Amino acid sequence: MKAILKYTIFILLSIVVITSISPTITFANTEESASKIRITEWQLHPGNDEDNKIPPADGWITVKENEKEPVLPKGTSSMWVKIQLPAEFDSHAGLLVNKAYAQNVFAYINGSMVYESIRDHYYDVNKFVIPLDGPTNETLYIHLVNETGNIGINGFVFGDYTNLYRNMVLQDLPDIILGAAFIFVAAIMFFCMIFLKKVHVSGWKSLSLIILSLGCLLILYSPFLYSVYEEYGFLFATGTDLSINVLFPALFFFLETIFGKGKFALVRIIKYYAMSLITLSTIGLGINIATDNAYYSIYYLVTTTLFAIGVIGGGIIFVGLLVIHSLKKQKDAIIVSIGFGIFILLAVFDMFKYYAASRNYEFLYWKWGIVCFILSLVITLGRQIVLSFEKVVTYSKQLEIFNNELQRSEKMDMISQLAASVAHEVRNPLQVTRGFLQLLEEKSISNKEKNYMVLAINELDRASEIITDFLTFAKPQLEHVTLLNIANEFKHIGSMLIPLANLQGGKLKLNIPDHLQIQGNSSKFKQAFINMIKNSIEALEGDGEIEIKGYREDNRVVVQIKDNGIGMTESELAKLGEPYYSNKTKGTGLGLMVTFSIIEVMQGNIVFKSSKGIGTEVYISFPAA
């Protein structure tokens, strides 16, 4: 899954590089081959859609390139444009119109129509090349008609028709490349859904739909298709409407997956609103197609109005959601905010250049903003999947630990029941046997018999100690709980074990502050630590050092026991505390079991760290009194 996300991000970054290089090359070629003669002055005459094919005789307004266009009268739905062509030109010449806002375009020279474009849809951005023939100075008239009232024209380049047409096509090629790349990424993501778990499918599917709809929008809203395949313009416009319908709900499905339904379920409300809008829009679109655009104006007005309301409301909720979660320092919200912020900044930069250039400007940078925004969504979804995977791994580890603890608890419970049932009964005959062996030892004459008796008594004492450990484990509850000063307790422990450590050739260092106090039973506390410190002394195997430190950490008292003995492997550490497991030749493992039980009853925690040949560290913590 991580590999899929890496490839997706790599493809998106490749898109940024391609789209940043392509416009530069394309526009450079356009300027080089098509700017032989640039028309810098033309004339306008506002009209209405009832104008005939004859241009008006007077009332023309002169417009110069890079100047602000004149404000047309309200309700203007048509406009005439008059352009004086150069005095001489070849028979294969043409005039590139870089941008014209109109549904219908007609061009005339000497009353004869030389170009015509009639659209049955509301996409009104035109980019075209008018073919020109003739060796004399001529006047070209262009008649623009647009029922929506959005009408205008700018950017005229005169030159060879073939070169102009080729460069017109190349200008819009980055949009096609970018859109196709988005569709390709969405297709890969749809394919990869078969490898996802059900919990991740919803977010992945909605993100795939977002990328797919944006790719379709970039392609279907580009003038390239309407210029080259004009006869399919209605299909392209319909596809644009459907892409917008998919984008809006998909975005809020994704937001709900990442951030939840939001306060007062606002995200879910907008999602349902978007779903209702897409249903209504699709039905209206079907009716419009069936009636041959008879109700297109009504459909366009209703869907545009409802969409604008949804965009405004959804945009406010979206921004508010990002702000709220970003202030909470949620990383997903910060990542999406950065991507969305870059998109907004680049879009604002485009608008600034648009108005600075008197609207004679091609919007470019907002597309890079879309790439950044999509990239932030991909990263966010990737984080969600990775975090979910880490939760599963953590849960698995916790489950394994729980199972180990359960097994250990079952073993201890079994031993506890066994100890409670037989310990007392076994200890009594042992004591009687020991007493008679002592009498026999006193009456023995030969040293050999005495040695046998001493050996037997020692073994009985060892058996008695094991029985004592059984009883301690079987009844771990504390009696006579008092306030314990850790330093005082370790003074008694040290007085008993320092001579033992010295006898073994090691050193025992105590560094316990006087102010550390806990609640517990003094004898049980000493028993637990004597067991652990004796283990450390026996692990020294001669010269070595055992350091015992105490300190307070938050609301707990921590005792650290560190030795430089033989150490243990990870597998040995994992078995510590299990019954009948011991690193000693004659050990039973019951000593550490008793120690664990005492520490557990005193609400303490114990952690072992060890390396073979280096030594062992033990951290025991108790609630501070």
Image (tube, grey):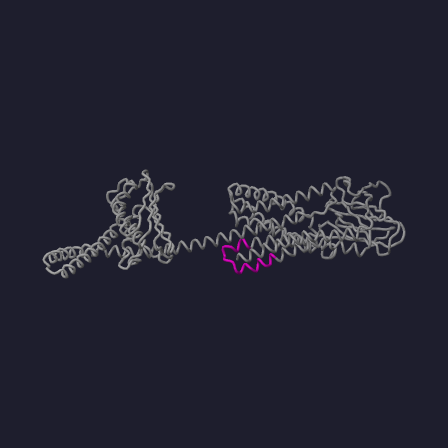
Q: Quadrant of residue 483?
A: top left
Q: Nearer the viewer, residue 61 or 458?
A: 458
Can you name the residue that lies furthest to the right here? Answer: 136
Asked if residue 268 shows in the view, the reply is no
Quarter of the figure with the C terminus? top left
Q: Nearer the viewer, residue 257 or 484?
A: 484
Q: Is residue 190 magenta?
A: yes
Asked if residue 371 shows in the view, the reply is yes
Q: Nearer the viewer, residue 168 or 306?
A: 168
Q: How far across and how far down the image is residue 335, in percent?
A: 56, 47
Residue at (86% x, 51% y) in the render:
109
Can you name the residue that lies furthest to the top here? Answer: 515
Q: How far across and how far down the image is residue 202, in percent?
A: 53, 54
Q: Nearer the viewer, residue 541 or 61?
A: 541
Asked whether, in this view, residue 53 is left or right of residue 463, the answer is: right
For residue 50, above or below residue 188: above
**Secondary structure mainly formed by the magenta segment:** helix
Q: How many marks?
A: 0
Image: magenta residue range:
185-204
Asked whether, in this view, residue 197 is left or right of residue 63, the answer is: left
Q: Is residue 561 magenta?
A: no
Asked whether, in this view, residue 130 is left or right of residue 367, the answer is: right
Q: How far across and how far down the image is residue 129, in percent?
A: 79, 53
Asked whether, in this view, residue 502 is left or right of residue 84, the answer is: left
